[in-house]
Image (cartoon, helix red, strand yellow):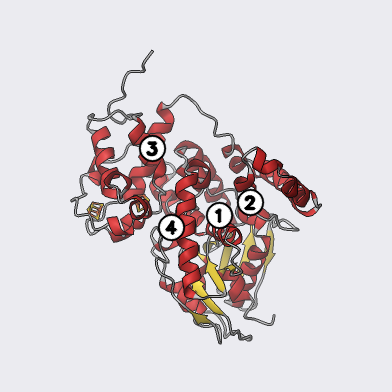
């Protein structure tokens, strides 16, 4: 039996008509939209997607019509359109609430992976197994056997992060620094803590060099970015509450994050709780104290690096740093302080690399097209190292470079900064 069409948005988390009606249909956002650049199709661009959201909001289009569901999923939520919009359309709010509406109306479908973001203990247990697989020799055997290709798992397996030899677990660590003026709460992250433990260690060293005390409270958890982007706003709020409480208890001055995608969500807790009178003031005060690591190091200043390099570097801008947080100059200013480093700008540095949370799983074809576009742009710079500031981008770039047989290294910006000091 055919389901009756669903007209309009309902309940909480509704795409706001005051936002979609702000769109003046000028099209200035189109050249910034990665999916529009790839398809040159109106509905695959921000203006088309806003029209679709408006059509559903006004009851002219079914919420679960395949075209609408597809466009809400094909959008990367990269916010490039939002950053250039002369009319100030907050596109991120529209797409995230539209996804929440779709997710609520659809027959429950498995989003089992979200369990791991709620339960970091389980995520760490799986990461431990993955580490065994990667380091015991089993991975080489499985890859050589061809079994991954047989089951169509080669690409997913290649995207899995290289698990750190030691996890970075938040356990109420405290690192005091002489004459510190600022105490920084360090967000250890979910993927960062199991696959980028070395970046977290380097982050602590850089914060201390810049004159901060650093605390890593155990009460923190996942920021909720993947959950919110998957349309599970209520679950995202539960995760957010844990971080707000941990930060309030810590007494720290700032909440520091070295993953751009997480930082953008942490800064949006204020909006996520805007309709909740009890949590709204706490969320607002929390979000005001969140800083991306590059933003804070740039603000506090870093001491003169003691090591020089002769490497040519290019910078890949994470969407959620450049567009959602509007931080573009700080990372470049920090890189410019490393003696000898030559920064070569790549074409389309701020166009999404196709990572975007779980986009590789939901839209594998578009993810691959954007990855290839990015790797071509990296290659054209002649750089030896591509630097970024988000784990998702780093994994996507590394996988793309590897599959192209490209020897360009990919590093987190904190790593390359940390390497510029003897101690
Ligand atoms: S730039 Fe802004 S106002 Fe113009 S079409 Fe895009 S979203 Fe609409
Ligand atoms: S968020 Fe990114 S992918 Fe989505 S419409 Fe805007 S520019 Fe395009």
Residue 394 picture quarter: bottom right
Picture residue at 63% right of the left edge, 65% below the top: 199
Which residue in the protein does label 3 denote? 70
* Residue at mark 2: 158
Seen from the viewer's position, the closer of residues 164 and 405 is 405
Residue found at x 62% / y 80%: 420
Task: Name the quarter where the C terminus is drawn.
Answer: bottom right
Earlier residue among tags 1 and 2: 2
Task: Select label 4 or label 2 by which is in front.
Answer: 2
Looking at the figure, which quarter contains the N terminus? top left
Position of residue 1 in the picture relative to residue 165 (left or right): left
Residues at marks 4 and 2 touching, judged by CB atoms closer than 8 Å: no
> What is the residue that sits farthest to the right in this orientation?
136
**Of label 3 and label 4, which has the lower sequence position?**
3
- Residue corresponding to mark 1: 247
* Mark with earlier residue (4, 2): 2
- Per the image, the residue denoted by label 4 is 352
Q: Does the residue labelled 4 lie within 8 Å of ligand 2?
A: yes
Spatial separation of the CA atoms under disc 3 and disc 2:
26 Å
């Amino acid at each position: 039996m055919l389901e009756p069409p669903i007209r309009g948005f309902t309940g909480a988390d509704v795409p706001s008509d005051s936002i979609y009606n702000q769109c003046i249909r000028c099209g200035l956002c189109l050249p910034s939209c990665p999916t529009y650049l790839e398809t040159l199709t109106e509905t695959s661009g921000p203006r088309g997607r806003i029209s679709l959201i408006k059509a559903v909001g006004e009851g002219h289009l079914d919420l679960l019509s395949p075209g609408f569901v597809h466009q809400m999923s094909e959008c990367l939520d990269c916010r490039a359109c939002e950053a250039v919009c002369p009319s100030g359309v907050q596109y991120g709010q529209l797409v995230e609430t539209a996804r929440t509406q779709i997710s609520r109306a659809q027959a429950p479908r498995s989003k089992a992976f979200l369990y791991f973001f709620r339960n970091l203990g389980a995520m760490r247990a799986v990461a431990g197994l993955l580490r065994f697989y990667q380091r015991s020799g089993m991975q080489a055997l499985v890859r050589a056997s061809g079994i991954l290709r047989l089951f169509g798992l080669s690409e997913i397996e290649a995207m899995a992060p290289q698990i750190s030899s030691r996890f970075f677990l938040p356990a109420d660590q405290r690192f005091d620094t002489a004459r510190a003026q600022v105490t920084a709460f360090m967000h250890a992250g979910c993927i960062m803590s199991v696959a980028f433990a070395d970046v977290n260690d380097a982050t602590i060293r850089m914060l201390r060099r810049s004159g901060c005390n650093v605390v890593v409270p155990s009460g923190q958890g996942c920021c909720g970015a993947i959950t919110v982007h998957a349309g599970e706003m209520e679950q995202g709020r539960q995760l957010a509450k844990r971080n707000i409480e941990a930060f309030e208890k810590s007494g720290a001055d700032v909440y520091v994050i070295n993953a751009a995608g997480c930082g953008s969500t942490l800064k949006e807790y204020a909006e996520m709780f805007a309709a909740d009178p009890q949590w709204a003031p706490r969320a607002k005060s929390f979000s005001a104290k969140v800083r991306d690591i590059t933003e804070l190091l740039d603000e506090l200043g870093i001491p003169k690096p003691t090591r020089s390099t002769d490497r040519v570097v290019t910078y890949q801008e994470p969407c959620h740093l450049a567009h959602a947080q509007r931080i573009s100059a700080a990372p470049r200013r920090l890189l410019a302080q490393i003696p000898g480093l030559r920064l070569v700008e790549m074409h389309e540095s701020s166009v999404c690399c196709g990572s975007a949370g779980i986009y590789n799983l939901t839209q594998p074809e578009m993810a691959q097209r954007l990855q290839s576009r990015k790797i071509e742009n990296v290659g054209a710079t002649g750089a030896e190292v591509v630097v970024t500031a988000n784990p998702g981008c780093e994994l996507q770039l590394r996988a793309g470079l590897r599959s192209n047989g490209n020897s360009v290294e990919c590093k987190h910006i904190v790593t390359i900064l940390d390497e510029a000091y003897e101690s």
